[in-house]
Image (spheres, rainbow, N blue to C red):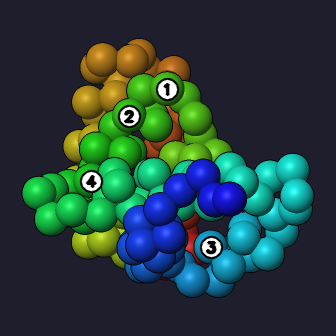
Amino acid sequence: MSVFDEDLFLKGLEQRKATLGAEYVENNLAAADEFTRPFQEAMTAWCWGFGWGDDVIDVKTRSMMNLSMLGALGKMHEWEIHLNGAITNGVTHDEIRAIIHVIGIYCGVPQAVECFRVAKKVLSKE
């Protein structure tokens, strides 16, 4: 018995691949085992199918929101992944800088420094 709706999973899988890249997503799903697979499937359905699956907020804005929230939480591994996705979704370098400035104002300079460090690493690969 599945813990999620199959249609929501498929919708989420499509959006997740569109934002993070098919190879990244397929590698994550392929690496899932009996222990982690239920989470991967539920997260794909819930986060990407339900959370990203409507048209109320466009994907660029969602990406900008994610960068702000993940930066505020200091989840830098996820921030880096979503920075790549944000670039895919059309977030510009100037917008990334502005997002980091807001993170610095509300979350502190050390967190902004971390975001800039990761951003420079990601942007240097473009």
Q: Which mark is residue 62?
A: 4
Residue 121 on image: x %, y %? 58, 59
| Image mark for residue 41 | none
Q: Is residue 114 left or right of residue 70?
A: right
In the figure, is residue 20 to the left or right of 88?
right
Give the amino acid type for the residue marked by disc 4 in the picture: Arg
Q: Tell me the CA gap for discs 3 and 1.
A: 23 Å
Mark 2 in CB contact with mark 1 (< 8 angstroms): yes
Residue at point 50%, 32% (across, down): 113
Q: Secondary structure at mark 1?
A: helix
The nearer-to-camera label among 4 and 1 is 4
Distance from disc 2 to disc 4, alpha carbons, whole Å, reads 10 Å
Percent x, y of residue 12:
44, 68
Type of the residue with mark 2 = Met
Q: Nearer the viewer, mark 3 or mark 1?
A: 3
Name the secondary structure under disc 4: helix
Question: Which residue is located at x 63 percent, y 59 percent?
Answer: 2
Q: Residue furthest left?
A: 56
| Residue on which the image places disc 2 | 69
Q: Along the line of sight, which residue is nearer the eye, 9 or 24?
A: 9
Q: Which residue is mark 3?
A: 25
Q: Which residue is mark 1?
A: 73
Q: Residues within 10 Å of mark 4 (few under 14, many from 20)?
A: some
Disc 3 marks a residue whose amino acid type is Val
Would you call the spot at circle 2 few (<14 residues within 10 Å), some (14-19), or many (20 or more)?
A: some
Q: Residues within 10 Å of mark 3 (few under 14, many from 20)?
A: some
